[in-house]
Amino acid sequence: VVDDEHKFGVRQKEGVKKVSPGVNMLYMSATPIPRTLKMALSNITSISTLSTPPSFKLPTTTYVDLFSLEVVRGAIFSEISRGGQVFFVHNQVRGIPALVSFLKKHLPSVRVEFLHGQEPGKLIEKKMEAFISKKYDVLVASSIVENGIDIPSVNTIIINNAHLLGLSQLYQMRGRVGRSSEPS
């Protein structure tokens, strides 16, 4: 069983088939890659669709807006006021410290931490544990958050410069929120 199929290329999939020629493989993805979709539509492979969300799952509401302090402040304070946390995705590692400074300056009561994939693994783990323990309200991060993070208290995600990301990335990141019975 392979989760997040879009992270596996043809070469990796063929490599698995060579190691275990008779194996049945199940690839799961919220966003099937075009090659898999074409193979399914051509009846080369089969595809199953789960179209019924869990009974507690509420639809995720998406807003598209220009970056502004008012929009950011409103989204963050709205989530914090109901006891939740926020992912703030900024996928340019060099710009993360400036964004963190901006948030701390304009939202001094908000506890902000940052995280990106270029940090040592132990530090990433330590920061994630602190965030999960609610020691921080906002986690400013690179697109690293798209990779299977499940934190039910995070029901708001702000994606800065979303136009610079791919559709499957945006869809995966959107799936990081709304993992509880809270509106997201």
Image (cartoon, grey):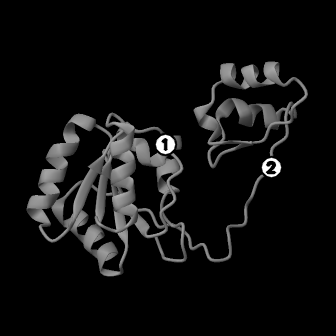
136 shown above or below 182: above
Question: Which residue is most to the left?
Answer: 105
153 shown above or below 48: below
Amino acid at dot 2: Ser
- Residue 62 visible here: yes
Rounded to the nearest angstrom, the CA distance separating label 1 from label 2 is 21 Å
Q: Secondary structure at mark 1?
A: helix
| Residue shown at the point (34%, 68%) measured from the top left | 134
The crowd level at tag 2 (other Cα within 10 Å; few <14, some 14-19, many 20+) is few
Q: Quadrant of the N terminus?
A: top right
Q: Nearer the viewer, residue 24 or 95?
A: 24
Question: Which residue is most to the bottom?
Answer: 82
| Residue shown at the point (17%, 61%) measured from the top left | 69
Q: Nearer the viewer, residue 45 or 123?
A: 123
The part of the image, by quadrant, that contains residue 117 is top left
**Residue 164 appears at what percent x and percent y?**
36, 37
Q: Nearer the viewer, residue 74 or 16?
A: 16
Q: Nearer the viewer, residue 49 or 152?
A: 152
Q: Is residue 13 left or right of residue 142?
A: right
80 shown above or below 148: below
**Residue 6 appears at what percent x and percent y?**
61, 36
The part of the image, by quadrant, that contains residue 55 is bottom right
Say whether disc 1 or disc 2 marks the residue closer to the N-terminus.
2
**Residue 137 appears at what percent x and percent y?**
29, 66
**How many numbered callouts?**
2
Query: Which circle marks residue 169 in the picture?
Result: 1
Question: On the image, numbered disc 2 is attached to which residue?
Answer: 48
**Residue 176 appears at what percent x and percent y?**
49, 57
97 shown above or below 88: above
Q: Secondary structure at mark 2?
A: loop
Amino acid at dot 1: Gln
